[in-house]
Image (tube, helix red, strand yellow):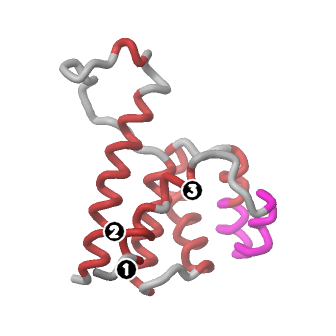
Amino acid sequence: MNTAIEKAKRSLEGLSVGDAFGQLFFQLSPYRITPSGLPQGPWRWTDDTHMAMSIVEILATYGRIEQDALARAFAGRYAKEPFRGYGGGARRLLEQIAEEGLARIVARLFGARSYGNGAAMRVAPVGAISRRT
């Protein structure tokens, strides 16, 4: 297998653990979590990891980001597991992509910007595959 894809998959693994750990703080007080007393699993990862999985899939398939394929992958994963914490705007967008396939047009819903840290959460695999060493 391509070493760059292996690196992207490792970055996805780290991202998912950090995502699931961070998700704990939406449910528990940070004062109740100590290194010796972490909550029992399973820890649930969120839409950020879910979407990063699509990014890795597209990078493995095409060797680059193919926007339409990525939009379809996002919409497909959302349809299978919509409970991962997607915000209202993302839900509308992904449902429209699944129904209409108008990824580039529907993306205007967000005015070409993000309203959270999701993009930062999902970009690690792109960096892993982009670095050629």
Which residue is rendered at x = 37% and y = 39% of the image?
Answer: 20
Q: Is residue 110 magenta?
A: yes
Residue 129 vertical position relative to residue 83 in the rendered view, above or below: below
For the point 55% across and 74% down, which residue is it?
Answer: 70
For disc 1, the marked residue is: 60
Indicate which label's residue lies in the foreground, 3 or 1: 3
**Left-right relation of 97 to 22:** right
Residue 9 picture location, percent across and down: 30, 66
Q: Nearer the viewer, residue 101 or 23?
A: 23
Secondary structure category for the residue under label 3: helix
**Residue 18, image x, y percentages:** 36, 43
- Residue 51 lies, in percent from the top left, at 50, 59
Q: At 79% across and 73% down in the image, what residue appears?
A: 105
| Depth order, front residue of 123/53 | 123
- Cβ–Cβ below 8 Å for labels 1 and 2? yes
Q: Read off the residue under disc 3.
A: 119
Find disc 2 in the rendering and name its residue.
8
Which region shows up in magenta? 94-111
Q: CA distance from mark 3 to mark 2?
A: 16 Å
